Image (cartoon, helix red, strand yellow):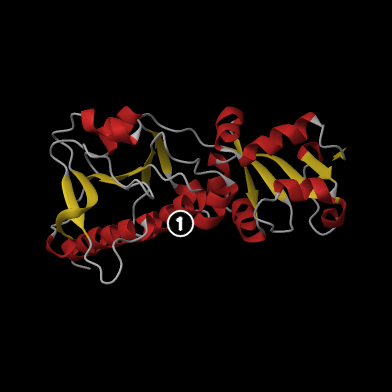
């Protein structure tokens, strides 16, 4: 078991970068905090084959309560250093976990021909995590992270997703403005738009792309020519939070699937 007491320590500086999307991308690792999520990861053997635990970070106060079985990857940090890494303020141990591989944009297009695939540009990790939780709840597990998107493995995203982040299949994608130049004639393309047809009258798709608008900017002016634009009628407010809006869309799709299956 190694002890780390200085913020100048190279391992600590590497772990500190995991609080940023760039650091996660460069290191190929992310931090897991919170007793519930850590317990879930430790108990799920299938999940452990997908997400390898690279290190356990603890403090002298927590060490006796949660002893690790593998001393070669356990690091004891001072309470202050551990708090610097515990962005969600859980007050417990942390795990350093290897990120699963992201599939390519080309593979996402193949998947969209047989299932629903979300196109996500959300830069706020908490909103992104909430979206992933809704997606899993409504049976969607394929997500393209557009260039504007935060990493789905930021601590706030993982926490807001309640672990859904590590049960998703992620793909790399282009920037949201580049979507207008795509030629996807055989793949349905749906986007929420205040000027679109009403969601109530929509016949849900069983496969294709669903585009989530950016918080603030919303949708780009140009999208693929065959885009189906939908709107959700509201009272007293102009629009809904992107996560809430896409959740309503996903529920509509799930409802259609259940109806068609006769359940």
The quarter of the picture where the C terminus appears is: bottom left
Count all numbered tags in the image, as a single digit. Answer: 1
Q: Is residue 117 above or below residue 44?
A: above
Question: 261 left or right of 122?
Answer: left
Question: 91 left or right of 118?
Answer: right
Question: 40 left or right of 185?
Answer: right
Q: Quadrant of residue 37?
A: bottom right
Residue at figure coordinates x 36%, y 61% from the top left: 244
Q: Position of residue 2 (x, y in %)?
A: 85, 37
Q: Position of residue 105 (x, y in %)?
A: 34, 30
Please give the residue where the numbered disc 1 appears in the rendered image: 130
The residue positioned farthest toward the bottom in the image shown? 235
Question: 102 left or right of 255?
Answer: right
Give SS at disc 1.
helix
Q: Position of residue 232 (x, y in %)?
A: 23, 62
The crowding category of the residue bearing disc 1, from other C-alpha atoms within 10 Å (few below 14, some 14 to 19, many at least 20), is many
Residue at figure coordinates x 63%, y 41% from the top left: 19
Residue at figure coordinates x 13%, y 33% from the top left: 185
Is residue 115 visible in this depiction of the protein? no
Q: Quadrant of residue 181?
A: top left
Q: Position of residue 134 (x, y in %)?
A: 39, 58
242 vs 165, nearest the viewer: 242
Is residue 85 visible in this depiction of the protein? yes
The quarter of the picture where the N terminus appears is: top right
């Amino acid at each position: 078991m190694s002890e780390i007491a200085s913020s100048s320590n190279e391992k600590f500086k590497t772990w500190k970068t995991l609080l940023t999307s760039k650091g996660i991308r460069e290191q190929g690792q992310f931090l897991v905090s919170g007793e519930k999520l850590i317990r879930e990861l430790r108990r799920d053997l299938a999940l452990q084959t997908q997400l390898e635990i690279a290190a356990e970070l603890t403090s002298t106060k927590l060490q006796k309560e949660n002893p690790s079985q593998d001393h070669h990857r356990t690091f004891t940090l001072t309470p202050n250093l551990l708090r610097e890494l515990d962005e969600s303020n859980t007050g417990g141990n942390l795990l350093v976990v290897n990120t699963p591989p992201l599939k390519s944009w080309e593979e996402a297009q193949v998947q969209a021909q047989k299932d629903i695939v979300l196109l996500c540009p959300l830069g706020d990790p908490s909103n992104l995590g909430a979206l992933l939780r809704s997606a899993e709840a409504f049976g969607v597990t394929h997500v393209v992270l557009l260039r504007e998107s935060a990493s789905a493995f930021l601590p706030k995203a993982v926490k807001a997703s309640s672990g859904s982040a590590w049960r998703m299949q992620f793909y790399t994608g282009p920037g949201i403005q580049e979507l207008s130049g795509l030629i996807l004639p055989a793949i349905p393309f749906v986007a929420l738009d205040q000027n679109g047809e009403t969601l109530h009258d929509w016949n849900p798709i069983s496969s294709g792309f669903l585009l989530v608008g950016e918080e603030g900017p919303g949708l780009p002016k140009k999208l693929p020519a065959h885009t189906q634009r939908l709107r959700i009628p509201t009272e007293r407010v102009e629009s809904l939070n992107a996560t809430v809006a896409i959740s309503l869309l996903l529920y509509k799709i799930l409802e259609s699937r259940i109806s068609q299956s006769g359940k």
